[in-house]
Image (tube, rainbow, N blue to C red):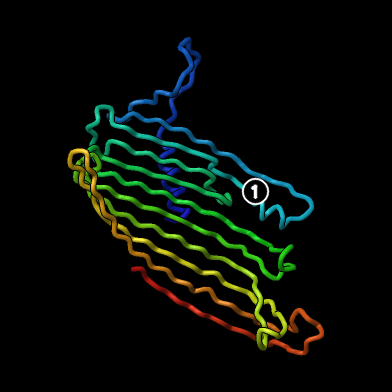
Amino acid sequence: MNRALLLALTAAAACFAQPTVAPTNERVGEARGRTFDNYNLLQSWELGYRFHSTGGNESKYRSDVNFGNGVRLLSSRLSLNSRDGHGGLFDELVLATQGLGDDPYEYASFRIAKNKLYRYDLLWRSNEYFNPADPVAFGLHRMDTVRRLQDHDFTLFPQSSFRFFGGYSRNRQEGAALSTVLFPDFLGDEFPIFSDVDRTQDEFRFGNEIRIGGIRLNWLQVFERWREDTSFSLNERSQGVNPGDRAVLDRLQRTEPYEGTSP
């Protein structure tokens, strides 16, 4: 699920009007929500602007904190629950988000369920990773990537003693990186090269569970597929790190894609 779709979902959910707040003598407690088409609606939205000002080492700030400027949906939560347990297409709908709008750490979860029939859960995360690697590689190795993870789980007849479940997960990393290559061999000079990181891992799973008396039997079949498409390049002449070495690298293009499955 991409960021644009998540923002669209939360924006549409926010269109439900918030309850009017007025002075009252009632005891303060948990929000009771309001009735919306035979559902109980509870919601909260926190919108703000994040700004930062740093001094000193910008790379250190990015590697440890990495928050930038801009409007953010800092957090939100929306829940719809059928009042009598017999809703239409669903009896429970829950949406929660955190940090949407280009925070380095974004999160969203979504659940929709119908009593005794189905349950679907979605979990989405995005993590911006920056590592200058100054202390260990003198700035010749660094990464500026984004990792996005998503998990989908679907259960059929969730309250039954005989239920089925299936799911899908994806782990994807992409972005820019800086690495080095030894030329002409492992005893040669070290040359900085650019890297276009592109890694994907997919997982498919399905199974079922049977409960008989006090015994519970379940099985789960998992299929994994991974793909590495990271490329390396040097587009201008480089004399390497060691000025005493006469080796010169004019240009380099290297791709070593591979993919596999399990089982």
The single residue placed furthest to the front in the displayed view is 214
Left or right side of 214 for 197: right
Q: On screen, 166 above or below 239?
A: above
Q: On screen, 177 above or below 119?
A: below
Q: On screen, 218 above or below 34?
A: below
The quarter of the picture where the N terminus appears is bottom left
Q: Quadrant of residue 226?
A: bottom left
> Amino acid under label 1?
Asn
Left or right side of 43 for 211: left
In the image, 195 versus 2, the foreground residue is: 195
Q: Secondary structure at mark 1?
A: loop
The single residue placed furthest to the top in the displayed view is 25
Tally of marks: 1
Going 69% across and 87% down the picture, which residue do you hit?
249
Residue matched to label 1: 69
The spot of residue 224 in percent (x, y) is 37, 65
Going 24% across and 51% down the picture, which residue do you hit?
208
Going 43% across and 24% down the picture, which residue do you hit?
31
In the image, 122 versus 139, the foreground residue is: 139
The spot of residue 173 in percent (x, y) is 51, 63
The spot of residue 247 in percent (x, y) is 74, 89
The quarter of the picture where the C terminus appears is bottom left
In the image, 215 versus 226, the foreground residue is: 215
The spot of residue 205 in percent (x, y) is 31, 58
- The 10 Å Cα crowd at callout 1, few under 14, some 14 to 19, many 20 or more, is few
Left or right side of 23 for 205: left
Going 40% across and 23% down the picture, which residue do you hit?
32
